[in-house]
Amino acid sequence: MRDTPPTQPLLVTPTGAEVIGFQAEGDEALRWWEQLRLAHPASGLWPLLMDVDTPGQLTESYPSNNGQVWSAADAQALNGAALLAELGERYLSTSSPNYAAKLRAELAGEGVWPEKPEQPGFGLPYSWNGEPAEVTVALVPATAPWLVPVTLQHSVFWSPDPAEHSAIMRYWHGRYGAEPVVWTDTTLEYAVARPPTTPPDALALAWEYRQYNDGGFDYYHADTLTELAAGLMNAPVWRVWWD
């Protein structure tokens, strides 16, 4: 195993957690993520790829907490699956009757399944044209990947809040083996060990995905829930964003 490059302090969270890191780019950054992920059980440091500006943006966001601090216990007290289900029911209840009926029909498997769904890979550590981009490989003191939001005391655009975000991550980690790889001020990208492999399971995930982030179907160029489900089925990478 290669020695980690020299690290530097990146930020200190409101709870005193110290995040360190180093710079890398492109495929090399992903290789570092994989190596550091394997070392996590011994190191207790969860690796994340961040835009070079993200540590500063996280620090600047802390005053907006107004003293609120979320703990691992707060996250453990929440049920991520139940949170997503509640959001889904609320969305249906506030949608127009026609649109709600369309969504329910899709969830029942009545949508048109695309032949070639969009399945994007990792955005970072690459630029918009696919060229390698320099990123920060951050090392977050978190004993489990789902503790990253409450460790950083940050949830992308604060919706969901850090405790809710950790609960949803815990649920998706247990069910799908989803682990955070990329974290910026507006996006998250997951490596997924056990993505859904059947249309019904993919539709169920797509519905949760739609409640999870307000970026909708953008990364998947999907106009319908069914098209989104096709993009998520058997996908080793999930990308989400908040506007």
Image (cartoon, rainbow, N blue to C red):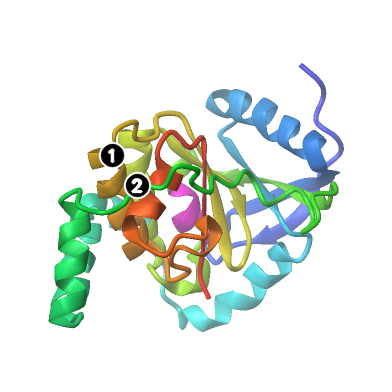
Which residue is at the front of the view, 224 or 56? 224
In the image, residue 151 lies in the stretch drawn in magenta: yes
Q: How crowded is mark 2: few (under 14 residues within 10 Å), some or many (20 or more)?
A: some
Q: Where, by quadrant of the figure, is residue 38 drawn?
A: top right
Q: In this view, does 74 lie above or below 120?
A: below
**Looking at the picture, does residue 21 appear above or below residue 225?**
above
* Figure quadrant of residue 39: top right
Q: Is mark 1 on a helix, strand or loop?
A: helix
- Magenta stretch: give its range: 147-152
Q: Badge 1 local density, few (<14 within 10 Å), some, or many (20+)?
A: some
- Residue 208 vs 230, above or below: the answer is below
- The image position of residue 206, as x and y in percent, is 33, 52
Q: In this view, does 105 lie to the left or right of 57?
A: left
Residue 236, image x, y percentages: 51, 35
**In the rendered image, which residue does mark 1 sit on?**
199
| Residue at screen point 62% across, 43% down | 121
